[in-house]
């Protein structure tokens, strides 16, 4: 008996740690049906090493439904986040992510078949805004230079390939966040871009025509942070785009 108790005591910190890394989340059915959770939860889990399981409301650490602080608008209403168990470490990480600049961009970048379904919460005062730390901007610039500079100018208007717009020009577009967050879906990027757990492998009969761009979601988040912090190109009249 004493030996068994000693084993449990030795394992207890590990059990607590495992519990903190498993979040039980309740999400209203319309949001689930939209596919948003399949878009954002793998990104969160990959970055934070926290597993999220969708559960019934009465078993959740956290809920995204009709109660709590406004999180985002979409599907005809404002969706709110409610930390049912606010002391749970994993749940706190998920709340922080969903309310952060990166998390909000990920939600707003969800555009199945090119249709954006979610946007900024109309109750804006409920949303906490996180200022991007300088080191995140630097990491984003570094990733942009490594992964994007062979085609795009990532600083100013010069450089890159003449037929491709610079980052500062893209930043001038009203939908720049969606374009950057979903760039891997926009031609010609699918032909040569690979993001683990996000993009499909290249077909055997259609390999990448150039050296592939291989990146992870952390690098994409960093690039979004960098572009969000940079100035848009001043091109005079408002840009018109297709």
Image (spheres, rainbow, N blue to C red):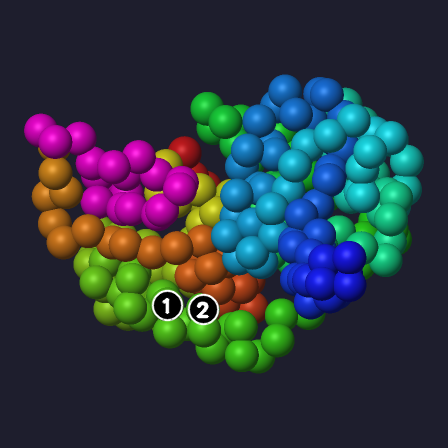
Above or below residue 65? Residue 46 is below
Check if mark 2's residue and mark 1's residue have beta carbons within 8 Å.
Answer: yes
The number of numbered badges drawn on the structure is 2
Furthest residue toward front: 1
The image position of residue 222, as x and y in percent, is: 48, 64
Q: Residue visible at 50% across and 52% down?
A: 46
Q: Is residue 73 magenta?
A: no
The image position of residue 219, as x and y in percent, is: 42, 61
Q: Residue visible at 21% across and 45% down?
A: 192
Give the numbered dot on residue 143: 1
Instruction: Residue 93: tell me if it is visible.
Output: no
Above or below residue 97? Residue 110 is above
Which SS class for mark 2? Answer: helix
CA separation in Å, label 2 and label 1: 5 Å
Above or below residue 54? Residue 68 is below
Q: Residue visible at 41% across and 34% down?
A: 242
Give the numbered dot on residue 140: 2
Give the numbered dot on residue 238: none
- Residues in magenta, as a range: 188-205
The image position of residue 119, as x and y in percent, is: 68, 39
Which SS class for mark 1? Answer: helix
């Amino acid at each position: 008996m004493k030996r068994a108790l000693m084993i449990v005591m030795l394992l207890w910190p590990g059990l607590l740690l495992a519990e903190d890394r498993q979040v039980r989340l309740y999400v209203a059915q319309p949001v689930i049906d939209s596919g948003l959770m399949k878009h954002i939860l793998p990104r969160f889990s990959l970055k934070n090493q926290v597993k999220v399981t969708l559960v019934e409301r009465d078993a959740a650490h956290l809920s995204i439904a009709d109660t709590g602080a406004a999180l985002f608008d979409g599907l005809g209403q404002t969706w709110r986040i409610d930390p049912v168990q606010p002391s749970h470490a994993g749940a706190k990480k998920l709340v922080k992510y969903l309310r952060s600049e990166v998390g909000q961009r990920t939600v707003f970048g969800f555009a199945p078949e090119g249709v954006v379904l979610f946007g900024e919460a109309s109750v804006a005062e409920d949303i906490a805004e996180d200022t991007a730390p300088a080191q995140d901007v630097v990491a984003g610039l570094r990733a942009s230079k490594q992964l994007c500079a062979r085609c795009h100018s990532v600083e100013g208007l010069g450089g890159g390939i003449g037929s491709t717009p610079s980052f500062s020009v893209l930043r001038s577009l009203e939908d720049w966040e969606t374009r950057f967050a979903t760039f891997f879906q926009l031609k010609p990027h699918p032909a040569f871009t690979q993001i683990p757990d996000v993009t499909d492998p290249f077909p055997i009969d259609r390999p990448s025509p150039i050296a592939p761009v291989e990146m992870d979601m952390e690098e994409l988040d960093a690039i979004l942070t960098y572009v969000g912090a940079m100035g848009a190109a001043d091109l005079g009249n408002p840009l018109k785009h297709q």
